[in-house]
Image (spheres, rainbow, N blue to C red):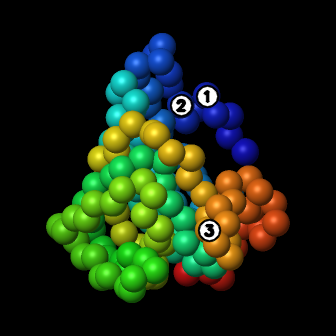
Amino acid sequence: MKDDLEHRKKFNNFFQIRWKEALGNPECPYLYRWMLIIFGFSIRLHHWIKSDDRRYFHDHSCDLISIVLKGKYKNVTPNGEFPVKAISCWKAKAKQRHYLDIPKEGAWTLLLCSRKYHKWGFYVNGHKWRPLRYFHKFGIIQDENYQ
């Protein structure tokens, strides 16, 4: 696994650049992420390869606006599935629960994120689980056969 310093450049607590971070299993990440963080706000470029973990809904640490640059996907919430295609956008409050269902072709998104004000997690049977506990219990599902 590559050293974090290869992917992160930090300048005091005001400015940070993260370059092509692989999320999920190192052998087959479900997402590559590039990030620019300025005074706690962030701009993120995501290259989605596989879907979010579909077993349970999750929320986020900040409010966000997501703009689909290329491809499409479904934003799945407790209220239904909402198709999102290229050159469209949607916004969400940090505590809104969802997961993204990504097709084989993948997708590219640009996220504009507020400052973090909430600890994100998965909602398992009505209880919020932080990511470390969740993945320790259930494992990472996004392997080479997962879409």
Q: Position of residue 67 (x, y in %)?
A: 25, 60
Residue at 42% in and 64% down: 96
Residue 118 placement, left or right of 72: right
* Amino acid type shown at disc 3: Tyr
Q: Element at badge 3?
A: strand
> How many residues crowd mark 2 within 10 Å: few (<14), some (14–19), many (20+)?
some
Contact between labelled residues 2 and 1, with CB atoms less than 8 Å apart: yes
Rounded to the nearest angstrom, the CA distance separating label 1 from label 2 is 5 Å
Q: Which quarter of the figure has residue 143?
A: bottom right
Against 94, residue 140 (above or below) is: below
- According to the picture, the residue beneath numbered tag 2 turns out to be 8
- According to the picture, the residue beneath numbered tag 1 turns out to be 5
Against 141, residue 21 (above or below) is: above
Rounded to the nearest angstrom, the CA distance separating label 3 from label 1 is 32 Å
Q: Element at badge 1?
A: helix
Q: Which quarter of the figure has residue 142?
A: bottom right
Against 31, residue 106 (above or below) is: below
Query: Nearest the camera: 143 or 15?
Result: 15
